[in-house]
């Protein structure tokens, strides 16, 4: 995975995470002013970094993003806002840019003030470690992790006018994932030259098909943020003629990152892919998909490799969308379970084995009503999830 031209990155361990030596500060620097846009959490209790970034985007002059993990700087009042501002000032001084051109991200425990002396040392160390190698990118991706079991990176290169541009993204997320914005932290970088208007449109469309379409337990966090930075270092401009291919590439990167989040859900043993077709509208399809995804009964059945299709059908029935039991068809891992208003005979032992031995379980529901469709991703619910979240703070 490569950084786009003109970007450098780093990640260091500063000591915010006292129980581990994993990176907890990440820094990304553009060698020139970049267009910066963002999509943010809809939670009323927006964290200080979110409030700051909302004020600063969209922009045509972003130079850096500084992030920390282990502490969310959320529900921390005026002190928290001053600390978020201070993070941008420290990063700006270390990178010799203007503080107003720095964005900030935080993730971790809610309701605790940042240890600013530790954070300051970490940011300064990160600035000295900036590089454009794959290792530098990976260290930055690890710097935003909390309970993630691995870093998350996706990249795509496309041709524009005979030459290429690169789109690379990093993300974090394993729990507190609910599709009511971005459901995690994500930074998408590109060396394409893009106007703020196009960047904003592309990011919002991409988020709708990716980070808005994942769930672990339906909990929308206080810190959810996805940023898109475009610095134009490739010399290639995205105009209306190139917009489709560029948007498809950004969306592809976002979908790859989004799917990796429930696949890394806390304690998860299965990624669940839900595909809805034949709905009355795309909105109905999405409503049904999310309802099935958020069902604890569906999630625990798949955890136990139990093809209990009644739980899926009943979730569809209470989804508050147009449904006709007589036209609905349900398949799981390519096995037809329900059609024409009633059950279909199937080999339960074989299907159970298919669920048990494959990381991904596919749930396909055809409503047989219209042309609406949606894809959605979630994970199963395990005892390990309960253990992790019961012990997370204490």
Image (cartoon, grey):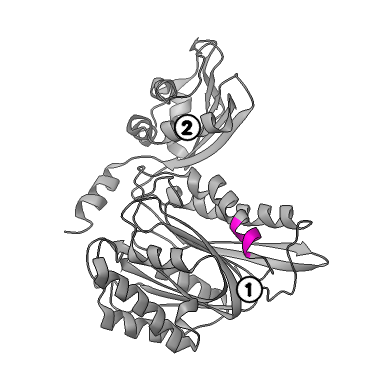
Give the quarter of the image for residue 89.
bottom left
Query: Gap between marks 1 and 2, in whole Å?
Result: 36 Å
Q: Residue at x 60, y 19 (%)?
A: 368
Q: Which mark is residue 287?
A: 2
Q: Where is residue 142 shown, x and y percent of the image?
A: 42, 68
Q: Which mark is residue 231?
A: 1
Viewport quadrant of the C terminus? bottom left
Give the quarter of the image for residue 61.
bottom right
Q: Residue at x 64, y 26 (%)?
A: 371
Q: Where is residue 139 shown, x and y percent of the image?
A: 46, 73
Q: Residue at x 59, y 58 (%)?
A: 200
Q: Where is residue 309 shown, x and y percent of the image?
A: 43, 22
Q: Which mark is residue 218?
A: none
Which span of residues is magenta-colored? 196-200
- Residue 128 seen in the current view: no
Q: Is residue 387 left or right of residue 87?
A: left
- Earlier in the chain: of badge 1 and badge 2, it is 1
Q: Secondary structure at mark 1?
A: loop
Q: Is residue 273 left or right of residue 90?
A: right
Q: Is residue 155 left or right of residue 135?
A: right
Q: Where is residue 237 shown, x and y percent of the image?
A: 74, 67
């Amino acid at each position: 995975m490569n950084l786009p031209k003109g970007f450098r990155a780093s990640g260091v361990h500063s000591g915010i995470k006292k129980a581990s030596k994993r990176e907890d500060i990440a820094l990304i620097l553009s060698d020139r002013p970049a267009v910066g846009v963002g999509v943010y959490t809809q939670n009323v209790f927006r964290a200080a970094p979110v409030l700051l970034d909302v004020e600063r985007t969209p922009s045509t002059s972003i130079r850096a993003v500084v992030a920390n993990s282990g502490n969310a700087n959320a529900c921390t009042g005026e002190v928290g806002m001053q600390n978020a501002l201070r993070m941008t000032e420290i990063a700006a001084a270390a990178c010799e840019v203007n503080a107003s051109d720095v964005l900030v991200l935080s993730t971790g425990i809610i309701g605790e003030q940042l240890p600013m002396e530790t954070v300051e040392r970490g940011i300064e160390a990160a600035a000295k470690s900036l590089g454009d190698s794959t290792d530098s990118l990976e260290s930055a991706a690890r710097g935003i992790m909390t309970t993630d079991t691995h870093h998350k990176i996706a990249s795509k290169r496309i041709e524009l006018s005979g030459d290429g541009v690169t789109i690379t993204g990093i993300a974090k997320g394993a729990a507190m994932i609910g599709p009511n914005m971005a459901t995690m932290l994500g930074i998408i970088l590109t060396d394409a030259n893009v106007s703020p208007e196009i960047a904003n449109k592309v990011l919002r469309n991409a988020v709708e098909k990716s980070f808005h379409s994942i769930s672990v337990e339906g909990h929308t966090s206080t810190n959810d943020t996805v940023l898109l930075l475009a610095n134009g270092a490739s010399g290639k401009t995205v105009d209306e003629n190139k917009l489709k291919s560029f948007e498809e590439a950004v969306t592809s990167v976002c979908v790859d990152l989004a799917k990796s989040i429930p696949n890394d859900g806390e304690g998860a043993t299965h990624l669940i892919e839900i595909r809805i077709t034949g709905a009355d509208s795309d909105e109905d399809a999405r409503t049904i998909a999310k309802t099935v995804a958020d069902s604890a009964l569906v999630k625990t059945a798949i955890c136990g490799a139990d093809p209990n299709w009644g739980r899926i059908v009943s979730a569809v029935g209470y989804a508050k969308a147009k449904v006709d039991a007589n036209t609905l068809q349900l398949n799981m891992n390519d096995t037809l379970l329900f059609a024409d208003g009633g059950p279909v005979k199937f080999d339960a032992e074989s299907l159970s084995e298919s669920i048990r031995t494959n990381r991904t379980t596919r749930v396909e529901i055809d409503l047989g009503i219209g042309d609406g469709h949606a894809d959605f991703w979630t994970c199963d619910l395990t005892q390990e999830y309960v253990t992790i979240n019961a012990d997370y703070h204490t």
